[in-house]
Image (spheres, rainbow, N blue to C red):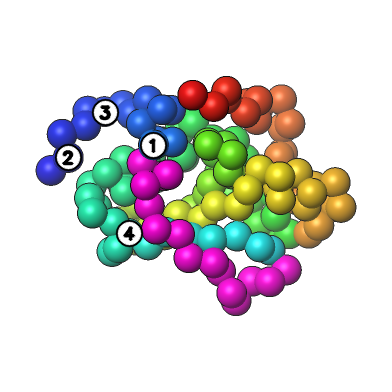
Amino acid sequence: MSERSWPLTDEEVERWLGEQTWKVAVTAPHNPHSYALRHECDDPVMFQRVVLHIREHGYIYRWGSGHYIQYRAGGYDCWTMGNALEATILINRKSTEQAERDEAEGKAGCGPIDPSARPAAREES
């Protein structure tokens, strides 16, 4: 069991996300992003805590006909596919720069449902 307590801070989530191994999603060249797999994480309980943090502190984001909860941390926008917690096997991320380019280009009709709900990027420590 992880020694970290609940709830997590944004800083703990950002640090944990930065420590993960990210793989490029080669099957989605139209949506450049990467992902980290739960079974490759050192602490699967922490993986689930981070998923919950993303869902509780993120904002609704539209991509095509889907809606996801997206969370901005460490220069990346992170999201899961919205499955039940026990069925969530990965966390996705793309650079904030790429997300902003996608929005500017109107790619897949993407963007936050309520732009005011998206927090400004936090200062790098």
As measured in the structure, the alpha-carbon distance from the residue carrying label 3 to the one carrying label 2 is 10 Å
As measured in the structure, the alpha-carbon distance from the residue carrying label 4 to the one carrying label 2 is 15 Å
Residue on which the image places disc 3: 6
Residue on which the image places disc 4: 38
Kindly identify the amino acid type of the residue bearing the numbered disc 2.
Answer: Ser
Kindly identify the amino acid type of the residue bearing the numbered disc 1.
Answer: Arg
Which portion, as a residue range, is magenta?
16-30
- Mark 3 or mark 2, whichever is nearer to me: 2
Residue on which the image places disc 2: 2
Kindly identify the amino acid type of the residue bearing the numbered disc 3.
Answer: Trp
Q: Are marks 3 and 2 in contact (CB under 8 Å)?
A: no
Residue 27 located left or right of residue 85: right
Q: Tell me which numbered mark, 1 or 3, is placed earlier along the sequence.
A: 3
- Mark 1 or mark 4, whichever is nearer to me: 1
Give whichever of 48, 96 is nearer the camera: 96
Kindly identify the amino acid type of the residue bearing the numbered disc 4.
Answer: Arg
Residue at left 65%, top 57%? Answer: 66
Q: Main secondary structure of the magenta part?
A: loop
